[in-house]
Image (cartoon, grey):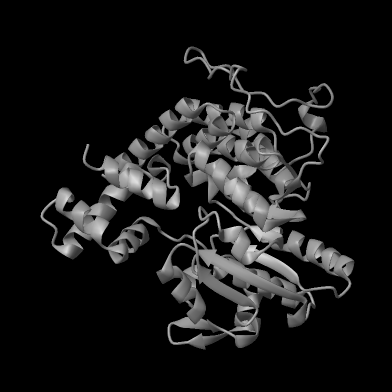
């Protein structure tokens, strides 16, 4: 197929596993660039692509769709502040803290790091932040520091009043924050990256590894290890914990922070487990009711002795689960999921939430089981497909992961019709 050479180009240049974003997205980008250049066909476009570094960047830009906002995963920033204050005290004025955001996209993440540390009372001399991204357009936008409403999400927007001023239809970041951050164009697959930038106390690399195949994940991880101090902390995306465990990292144990450090030398990394069979998916005949284990036997209470509880509607309870999980309240979100399963019929989205909660807590086997339950109820659930694919890839089952990615891509195509 003629598109395969473009897929290989993207894999070699930026490490992109095309299936992870969906073949249709890449095909759309190719069509857009063909139209932009008035190319006769894909072969004509391929010839032009090989001759023009500018067009190579344009294709990469067309494929990459930045999805970011200020203080995404807020508990990560809360954890960072505490860890940074401790590390700064250990340095005792020897040097400022060094932080890295990779990829930094249009700057929301590195500027969030700066705002969090400044709001915690640190002085500008206490830290420096670098942001690196493969997209020159994204980096240029980040340097300008002007953001529209999509960059400000949620209800906790006090930082906007403290650090921005209105600028036309957007908001302009103030100079105090801008000066703390250096944004540059760079490629995480560049082996010279660590040599150019040195080592960092804290590295934010979130939701990047999930877009790579297993060999590229290993290459990127080796770069990240060289970029981080031996005692440095790596912050990742919610679905990437199982990958880090396989690669020799352990979670810090701070809820919803997605923060990892290196394993002690005497503790082996988690095996990829390719030889151990994965749990079978639920059989399609006669599904059994799902039960939640209890620490003590349940007892039946006569109706007269039961306390009257207002019953939430199904939609209210689902909204509460989403709110609790997004706020990082894992225990309450899990309890609400179990309450939903007690009150209502099994629902794929609820098992997906339970799987994601287990995933972020590092319980890969439990997450596998729960994602599979979600897919038993809704075979084309896109998030469950992608998160289960990530776990399978982390366990060495690349064929299984690819099948799920293909299913997710097909589901995406069907939803667009």
For the point 66% across and 69% down, the residue is 113
Q: Nearer the viewer, residue 313 or 137?
A: 137
> Relative to residue 29, is residue 371 drawn left or right?
right
> Residue 260: horizontal and vertical position, in percent?
72, 48
Q: Position of residue 371 (x, y in %)?
A: 56, 32
Residue sitting at x 69%, y 40%: 334
Position of 276 compared to 407: left or right? right
Residue at left 28%, top 40%?
4
**In this orientation, does residue 339 appear?**
no
Where does the image place residue 213, in percent across and percent down from the top left? 48, 39
Instruction: Count the marks.
Output: 0
Q: Residue furthest top?
A: 285
Which quadrant: the C terminus? top left
Left or right: residue 271 compared with residue 281: right
Q: On the rendered image, what quadrant is the N terminus found in?
A: top left
The answer to whether residue 259 is visible is yes
- Which quadrant of the figure has residue 118? bottom right
């Amino acid at each position: 197929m003629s598109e395969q050479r473009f897929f290989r180009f993207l894999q070699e240049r930026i490490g992109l596993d095309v299936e992870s974003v969906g073949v249709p997205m890449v095909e759309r980008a190719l069509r857009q660039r063909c139209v932009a250049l008035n190319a006769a066909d894909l072969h004509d476009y391929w010839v032009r692509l090989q001759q023009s570094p500018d067009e190579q960047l344009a294709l990469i830009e067309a494929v990459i769709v930045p999805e970011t906002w200020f203080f995404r995963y807020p508990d990560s920033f809360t954890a960072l502040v505490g860890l940074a204050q401790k590390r700064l005290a250990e340095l005792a004025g020897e040097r400022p803290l060094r932080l890295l955001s990779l990829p930094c996209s249009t700057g929301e993440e590195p500027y969030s790091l700066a705002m969090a540390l400044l709001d915690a009372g640190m002085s500008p001399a206490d830290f420096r932040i670098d942001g690196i991204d493969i997209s020159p357009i994204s980096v240029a936008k980040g340097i300008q520091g002007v953001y529209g409403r999509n960059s400000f999400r949620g209800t906790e927007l006090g930082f906007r009043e403290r650090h921005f001023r209105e600028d036309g239809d957007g908001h302009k970041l103030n100079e105090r924050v801008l000066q703390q951050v250096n944004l540059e164009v760079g490629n995480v697959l560049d082996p010279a990256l660590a040599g150019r930038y040195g080592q960092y106390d804290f590295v934010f690399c979130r939701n990047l590894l999930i877009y790579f195949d297993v060999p590229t994940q290993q290459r990127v991880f080796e770069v990240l290890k060289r970029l981080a101090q031996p005692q440095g902390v790596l912050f990742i995306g919610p679905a990437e914990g199982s990958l880090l465990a396989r690669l020799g990292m352990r979670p810090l144990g701070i809820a919803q922070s997605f923060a990892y450090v290196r394993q002690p030398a005497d503790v082996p990394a988690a095996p990829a487990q390719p030889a151990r069979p994965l749990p079978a998916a639920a059989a399609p005949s006669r599904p059994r009711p799902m039960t939640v284990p209890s620490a003590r036997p349940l007892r039946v209470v006569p109706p007269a002795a039961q306390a009257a509880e207002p019953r939430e509607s199904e939609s209210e309870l689902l909204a509460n689960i989403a709110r609790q999980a997004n706020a990082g309240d894992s225990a309450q979100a899990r309890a609400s999921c179990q309450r939903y399963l007690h009150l209502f019929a099994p629902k794929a989205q609820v098992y997906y939430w339970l799987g994601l909660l287990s995933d972020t807590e590092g319980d890969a086997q439990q997450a596998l089981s729960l994602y599979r339950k979600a897919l038993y109820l809704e075979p084309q659930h896109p998030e469950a497909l992608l998160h289960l694919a990530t776990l399978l890839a982390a366990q060495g089952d690349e064929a299984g992961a690819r099948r799920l990615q293909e299913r997710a891509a097909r589901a995406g195509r069907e939803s667009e019709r």
